[in-house]
Image: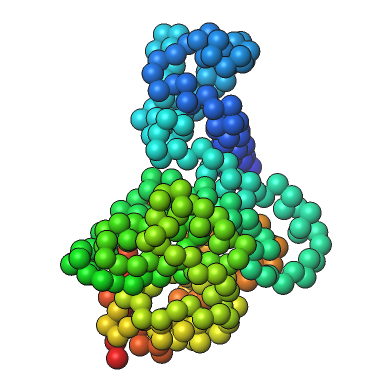
Amino acid sequence: MQSEITPDSYYQVLRQYQSAQLLFEAIKSDVFSYLDGPASAKEIAEKTGYCEKNIELLLLALFSCGYIEKQDNYYYNTKEGTAYLSKSSPYYLGKTILFREEMTTLYNLADKVKCDLNNTYTSGSCYDFSSLAEVTVPEMYATGRVKSFIDEVKNVFTNSSAQLKMLDLGGGSGVFAMEFAKHYPNSKAYVFEHPSVANTTSRIISNHKMENRVSVLTGDFNTDDIGESYNLIVASGILDFTTEDLNNFMKKIAVALLDDSYFLLVGRYSDTESYPKENILSWLSGYMNGIKPPPTKKQVDFALNNSNLKAVHAIQSGQFLGCLYKKVV
């Protein structure tokens, strides 16, 4: 029996972990920003002041893992490296990747397993959502989320001159609201955010010179009024953090919508009352800190149907899943 199995899979995991560590450290050193064109270790060392020998070793390791290319003594980015890891790119994701690594780290997991924390989740207690809002701006464009959103909206609202009112509930960066306002110049967009995040949202909107088109509403979407007469409400990844009864929450959204208007819901939901297999790894540290499991698909569907929010069709953009609903009276 022993000859039929090997520990190879565990050593593969170890190598994958080392490869991930290498990537994170290379991002921290910003080496990819010097590789948009062929460069030698000596040239990079001269520009950065780094140790030439160790830069050479770092580059060789990055090449061995497929993160960069090499020809003779010169190294250069892959197409993905130029697009996402060089600071010269508008879609630079280095800061985002490092933040998400820190946010979801499992480093001290063993300590959490050994004790009963008895934590009760309160909004914002586990994750730095303010920083998350900031670092996800380029990510939303790079992953295609913005394009999918705009394509969907244009199919629903075909008249770009229409006077519409849109709300991004728990919208963080405000990117969806800003893009909506750009495509519908006679419309008004709002982002509803928790006070701990709202200042960051306002700053991002101001940096994009959209403060006259996009407004930030501050409060707790579980308990506070979210406004009314919306043509579109977007809720991306927020149902995991609802503390009110889900049926009442969906009714609040339905009441805030005009008749025959739309609700775009993004999120993954399990078929059982447990932690979903698809994303438990990414959220494991948060779950151990007290975040409750997300509602089940059955619970979400019941609450939506009970609020006269009827499914139009499903939407998928990479790892992000969602569905468009219409308020039918």
Which residue is found at the position 29% from the left and 91% from the top?
329
Q: Is residue 297 visible?
A: yes
Coloring applied to the structure: rainbow
Residue 256 picture quarter: bottom left
Question: Is 281 in front, or is 32?
Answer: 32
Residue 235 picture quarter: bottom left
Residue 229's place in the image compared with 42, above or below, is below
Which residue is found at the position 55% from the left and 62% from the top?
198
Counting from the top left corner in percent of width and height, residue 103 is at 62, 51
Residue 260's place in the image compared with 40, above or below, is below
Residue 188's place in the image compared with 64, above or below, is below
Q: Is residue 275 visible?
A: no
Which residue is found at the position 32% from the left and 61% from the top?
180
Residue 261 horizontal side relative to residue 85, left or right: left
Counting from the top left corner in percent of width and height, residue 17 is at 60, 38
Quadrant of the snapshot with the N terminus: top right
Which residue is found at the position 51% from the left and 37% from the top?
94
Residue 137 horizontal side relative to residue 61, left or right: left
Counting from the top left corner in percent of width and height, residue 181 is at 32, 61
Q: Which residue lies furthest to the left in this view?
A: 159
Residue 158 picture quarter: bottom left
Counting from the top left corner in percent of width and height, residue 9 is at 57, 41
Q: Residue furthest right?
A: 115
